[in-house]
Amino acid sequence: MKQIPLKTTASILALSTVSGITTIITGIIPQLKKAFPTIPTTVIEWIVTIANFSALLTLMLNPSLTKKFGIKKIVIIGLLLSALMGIVPAMTNNFYLVMISRILLGLGVGLFSPHAIGLIAHTYYGDTRARLLGYQTGLSALGNAFLLGMASLLISLDWHLVFWLYIVLFLVAWLIFSFVPEPIKEPVTTVQKLVHLPKRQWQLIVLTFITYLLIWGVQLNLPSYFENRHLGNAQVLNLTLSAMNIGGLLAGLTFGRLYKHLQRFTLTLGYVGAGIAIVILWSTNDTNIAIGSAIFFNFIYSYTGPYLVFTSNDGLKKNQVNTISSYLTIATIISAFFAPLVWNLLGKIGPLSLIDNVLLWIIISLFLLAILTIISQSAKGSISNETKQ
């Protein structure tokens, strides 16, 4: 097997560092509420997530676009479009212009984001692929941690400055252009058939949607939660979000080793640990405990992402890998759009304040998922043992 150059691997992984770049403005939600006081909370939160929803259009078109123009060109175009649109809010106070730029930003994200996984799946195999998929999650967290850390410095000056961080996309576009070759295309058959996925893959896609809906519930409500409970100012919150991503990095780097020991119960650990972390966060008024539980939540929950990606790719053909990568990305993006609606609605159901109710619903959901995965994996284990006998 041909040795992949280190600069190629580094450039492919660089794409992962910006795969979640729409979220780097999460920490400025309280500032946006003050800057646009007449705009409803759900709409303000959509400034963070609307880019994920508009990305659906280019995600749906991605397979045909990459087939016609090649993966490399589409990734570069997506990065450049996102970079240009990402910095527009830095230069305006017009809410509608900010929203439009975020929508156009999403079109670019939909062009490059699925290939953070797809390029790894196309280029590497076996244990190397599993390890790099773990790195992919970790580096996505590291990229967000760095950018959120920078945001914590800029936000004390002016919230507009945070949007200048999107210029990093120009650098990643240059790396892909310079060091990543176009993946080898599979031979085209005379009759092109629709790519069908096994039932198990569809179940994993649904589970991915739910998994990311829960993490969005935490991330979107954390800024207001810290503010309401007087746990720290905007800088403290952004540094907490940054540290949370460092926790995600550690999880990504250790995923391969953990998966070898726990195998199918890796997912259960992620749900149970995250549930415990949110219980602690929900029940404390101490700043240090709240920060620690938030970091632990992101650390332990970050084992779920690479598990879902790795198991969904397992045993698939190359053309199916493209399809599952797009669908998984679509699932995460749809979850981001629906999160403000779902959690603001569920937050009204319960005996406490809206944000406290949201966290309570998230706790219940995490433990239910943990129970369901235990039942499911135990059933699979029983079937496997019967087959061996």
Image (spheres, rainbow, N blue to C red):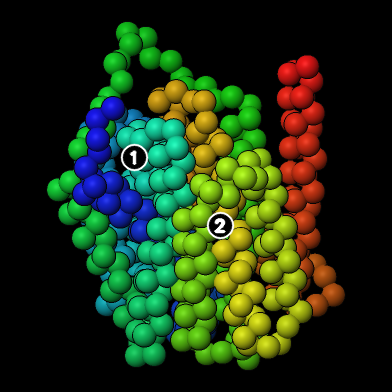
Q: Residue furthest left?
A: 178
> Could you tell me which residue is drawn at 53 percent across and 58 percent down?
251
> Could you tell me which residue is drawn at 52 percent across and 82 percent down?
237
Residue 196: where, in percent of width, then height?
Answer: 52, 22
Image quadrant containing the N terminus: top left
Image quadrant containing the C terminus: top right
| Marks 2 & 1, CB-CB < 8 Å contact | no
Label 2: which residue? 302
- The quadrant where residue 386 appears: top right
Left or right side of 383 for 226: left
Label 1: which residue? 119
Report helix, strand or loop for mark 2.
Answer: loop
Residue 125: where, in percent of width, then height?
Answer: 40, 32
**Res. 226 in view:** yes
Left or right side of 56 for 71: left
Q: Amino acid at mark 1?
A: Leu
Left or right side of 160 for 31: right
Left or right side of 267 for 123: left
Residue 3: where, in percent of width, then height?
Answer: 24, 35
165 shown above or below 234? above
Residue 340: where, in percent of width, then height?
Answer: 60, 64
Q: Mark 2 vs mark 1: which is more N-terminal?
A: 1
